[in-house]
Amino acid sequence: MVRGLPLDVIAKLKPIYSSLSEDSLLSRCLDGKTQNQNEALNGMFWERVLKGVFNGAEVLQLGIYDAVAHFNFGCPTVKILEELGLSPGQYCLTEYQKADSVRVFKANYKEQEVNKCQQ
């Protein structure tokens, strides 16, 4: 018995893999001067939903929604909470603003040419 992806799936995926392995694309990843934004988002998610604690599907989904919104929009995540009928307190607002400031500072720091080789 032969196992693997069906041929029609392979036919659809092969061009994608070919384009992702082009030298022009891969050359941008040399010298370790790239930052994987997915890892940053992943870190934001696991800050909200702890790995060592059991969480149901609803908690996981809310954690993902909140992390994505905060990653993409920063503090305006508070507006989303308000739309859901949740009133964020002063501590929530302060922490969101602090997290935004730290995130922007780190991104700007890492973007400086002088600091890229230290990542």
Image (cartoon, helix red, strand yellow):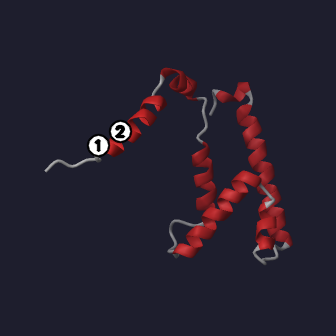
**Residue at horizontal 64%, vertical 30%?**
118
- Foreground residue, 9 or 46? 9
Left or right: residue 15 compared with residue 73: left
Q: Do the residues labelled 2 and 1 touch (CB within 8 Å)?
A: yes
**Residue at horizontal 42%, vertical 30%?**
18
Question: In the orientation shown, which residue stands out farthest toward the right?
Answer: 90
Question: In the orientation shown, which residue stands out farthest toward the front?
Answer: 8
Q: Position of residue 5 (x, y in %)?
A: 29, 47
Q: Distance between the residues labelled 2 and 1?
A: 6 Å
Q: Quadrant of the C terminus?
A: top right
For label 2, the residue is 11
Left or right: residue 5 compared with residue 71: left
For label 1, the residue is 7
**Residue at horizontal 21%, vertical 49%?**
3
Left or right: residue 78 compared with residue 64: right
Q: Position of residue 39 (x, y in %)?
A: 57, 47
